[in-house]
Amino acid sequence: QVQLVESGGGLVQAGGSLALSCAASGRTFSPYSMGWFRQAPGKEREFVASITWSFGSTFYSDSVKGRFTISRDNAKNTVYLQMNSLKPEDTAVYYCAATLNYRAIYYSTGAYDYWGQGTQVTVSS
């Protein structure tokens, strides 16, 4: 069983930065892709960014493109999300996820096999 543990959330003013980490542990970890999603109160969970584990190909939602950067450290089984120029509308619980399926639709929550518990990000105006 794979466990994903996020860290790095918190409170920041608009325009500031935060860095999230997601460490994987458990069985031999070899996902096809890992992603970050977020869920604001009263809203559905939405895709933020993803990265393929082998080649490091990245994908972003339009709302974060140019402000957020996803990266990974294969040796540490860790994926990161650097968030810059944060806006109040970025406020949400952020979840990392992993999929073993090479056919996974990277922006779909249903494509992911494992999820972290989430970390709160609050951006004040």
Image (tube, rainbow, N blue to C red):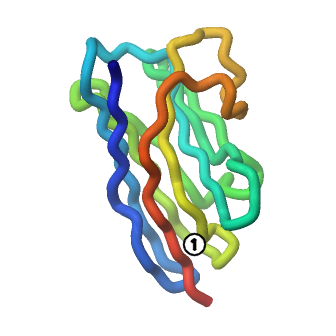
Secondary structure type for disc 1: loop
Q: How many marks?
A: 1
Give left or right: position of 108 versus 72. Answer: right
Query: Residue at coordinates 66% horizontally, 17% vertically from top-left?
Result: 104
Rendered location of residue 90, percent (x, y) = 63, 67
- Determine the residue positioned at 26% across, 28% down: 25
The picture quadrant where one finds residue 112 is top right
Quadrant of the drawing holding the C terminus: bottom right
Crowding at mark 1 (Cα within 10 Å: few <14, some 14-19, many 20+): some
Q: Is residue 22 above or below residue 110?
A: below
Q: Which residue position is annotated with label 1?
A: 85
| Residue 29 or residue 15, whichever sits in front | 29
Vertical placement of residue 38 versus 124, above or below = above
Would residue 107 be found to the left or right of residue 20 on screen? right
Q: Residue furthest bottom?
A: 125
Residue 95, position in %: x, y? 51, 47
Q: Quadrant of residue 5?
A: top left
Q: Position of residue 7 (x, y in %)?
A: 33, 55
The image quadrant where one finds the N terminus is top left
Estimate the x, y position of residue 6 in percent, counting from the top left: 36, 49
Foreground: 56 or 22?
22
Residue type beneath disc 1: Ser
The answer to which quarter of the image holds residue 82 is: bottom left
In the rendered structure, the answer to whether residue 68 lies left or right of residue 82 reads: right
- Residue sitting at 72 percent across and 47 percent down? 61
- Residue depicted at 64% across the width and 47% down the height: 48
69 shown above or below 71: below
